[in-house]
């Protein structure tokens, strides 16, 4: 993936399509100035408006090089009120334009897009009857790019959030991976209708489909489906004293597939088996079933399955590096926008070629404005 230079002074231009939600009276600070301050502050590790304000005061001279700041650095409340007023979907679209302007993708490649949910565990507000905020997000997993997110009040609402998220991202030439929560007919239909393909886990929340896939696998293993067109792939990895053997099997849907009429978008089924040998010599195994809209190679199926769980590393970074799981932000729009800023910060930090951890790069951004400039403008990629 090639990258072209984005001038730091042009960053504000990506937010010009946003309507300033503030009252026209007493606007002392420029709308775009506040938005850019928030972006820069979160990339440097700020966890909210108070920290963004502190960071901006310390870096005021550098910021004046490309921001107007007619009345100095805005207050914490000014930053907070703006992030509480900007609608998350419109806010995210501006960042998507930023990424699109900076990255030139290979038009022939089918990118892997993982959709998964994450709960902000300490964002509950018992006094107002609010549970923890749950964020369903989409990641281009091969490049670590945040594509979009939708906030819900409950984990179970992930089923309704996924179709909304699919409407916000580019599905053409994408292979979308989702866990069993997203094994829904409307999800499969929408992905195919949008020009994409899917690799979706199947469990007992769709018992008839799971039974149909299990039957095909069992008949194949029993030699009844010798002519069934299928592909295989396997890997053998070792680390931390443990050995993981993974076996991937993907086959075209047979003519008599029991769920064919109910799930017409399914063109192939897959099985992923993992056998783990632990340091004490004991073994455990795990078998997962998948539905696919395309008969892909065994290797690509394996990449999709393993790649989906790679999103957990993004969640780990959000919790350990950005402290997202500990955030006490209860106001929903503010929490949603700050959550998105963290995901976009990971995108920018991962894109920088410096061989360092996300946290290491974040600290360098905090200490060195020249490095921060490189991260913000996607230099060196």
Image (cartoon, rainbow, N blue to C red):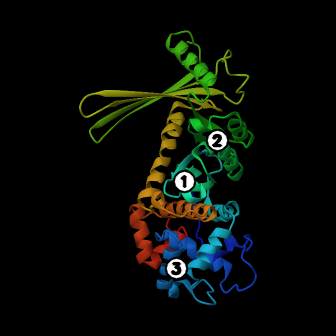
Describe the element under mark 3 as helix, strand or loop: helix
Question: Residue 52, position in %: x, y?
Answer: 51, 76
Give the mark, 2 or 3, whose residue is nearer the N terminus: 3
Contact? badges 1 and 3 (CB < 8 Å): no
Would you name the residue on which mark 2 appears?
159
Which residue is located at x 59 percent, y 73 percent? 80
Left or right: where does residue 140 sit relative to residue 261? left
Q: Is residue 308 visible?
A: yes
Q: Is residue 125 visible?
A: no
Q: Please tell me whether residue 184 is drawn above or below residue 63 in the rendered image.
A: above
Left or right: where does residue 274 sit relative to residue 133? left
Give me the disc on residue 3.
none
Which residue is located at x 60 percent, y 60 percent? 336
Describe the element under mark 1 as helix, strand or loop: loop
Would you name the residue on which mark 1 appears?
132
Give the mark, 1 or 3, whose residue is nearer the N terminus: 3
Would you name the residue on which mark 3 appears?
53
Which residue is located at x 57 percent, y 73 percent? 38
Compare residues 90 and 204 and report the one nearer the observer. 204
Spatial CA span between label 1 and label 3: 26 Å
Spatial CA span between label 1 and label 2: 17 Å
Q: Please tell me whether residue 142 is drawn above or below residue 252 in the rendered image.
A: below
All told, the count of numbered labels is 3
The crowding category of the residue bearing disc 1, from other C-alpha atoms within 10 Å (few below 14, some 14 to 19, many at least 20), is many
Question: Residue 358, position in %: x, y?
Answer: 43, 62
Describe the element under mark 2 as helix, strand or loop: helix
């Amino acid at each position: 993936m090639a990258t072209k230079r984005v001038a730091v002074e042009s960053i504000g231009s990506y937010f010009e399509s946003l309507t300033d939600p503030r009252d026209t009276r007493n606007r002392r600070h420029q709308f775009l100035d506040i938005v850019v301050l928030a972006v820069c502050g979160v990339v440097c590790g700020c966890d909210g408006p108070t920290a963004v304000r502190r960071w901006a005061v310390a870096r005021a001279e550098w910021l004046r090089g490309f921001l107007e700041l007619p009345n100095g650095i805005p207050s914490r409340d000014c930053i907070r009120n703006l992030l509480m007023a900007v609608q998350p979907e419109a806010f995210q679209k501006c960042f998507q334009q930023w990424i699109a302007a900076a990255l030139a993708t290979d038009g022939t490649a089918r990118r892997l897009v993982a959709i998964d949910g994450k709960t902000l565990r300490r964002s509950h507000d018992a006094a107002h009857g609010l549970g923890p905020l749950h964020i369903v997000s989409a990641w281009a997993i091969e490049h670590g790019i945040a594509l979009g997110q939708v906030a819900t009040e409950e984990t179970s609402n992930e089923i309704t959030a996924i179709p909304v998220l699919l409407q916000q991202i580019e599905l053409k030439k994408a292979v979308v991976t989702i866990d069993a929560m997203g094994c829904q007919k409307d999800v499969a239909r929408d992905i195919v209708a949008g020009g994409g393909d899917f690799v979706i886990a199947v469990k007992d929340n769709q018992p008839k489909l799971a039974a149909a896939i299990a039957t095909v696998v069992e008949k194949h293993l029993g030699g009844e489906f010798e002519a069934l067109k299928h592909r295989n792939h396997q890997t053998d990895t070792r680390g931390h004293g443990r050995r993981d053997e993974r076996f991937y099997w993907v086959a075209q849907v047979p003519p008599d597939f029991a769920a064919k009429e109910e799930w017409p978008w399914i063109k192939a089924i897959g099985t992923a088996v993992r056998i783990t040998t632990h340091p004490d010599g004991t073994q455990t195994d795990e078998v997962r079933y998948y539905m696919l809209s395309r008969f892909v190679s065994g290797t690509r199926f394996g990449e999709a399955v393993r790649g989906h769980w790679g999103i957990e590393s993004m969640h780990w970074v959000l919790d350990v590096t950005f402290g997202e799981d500990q955030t006490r932000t209860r106001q929903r729009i503010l929490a949603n926008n700050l959550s998105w800023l963290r995901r976009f910060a990971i995108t920018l930090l991962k894109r920088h070629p410096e061989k360092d951890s996300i946290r290491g790069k974040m600290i360098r951004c905090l200490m060195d404005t020249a490095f921060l400039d490189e991260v913000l403008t996607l230099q060196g990629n």
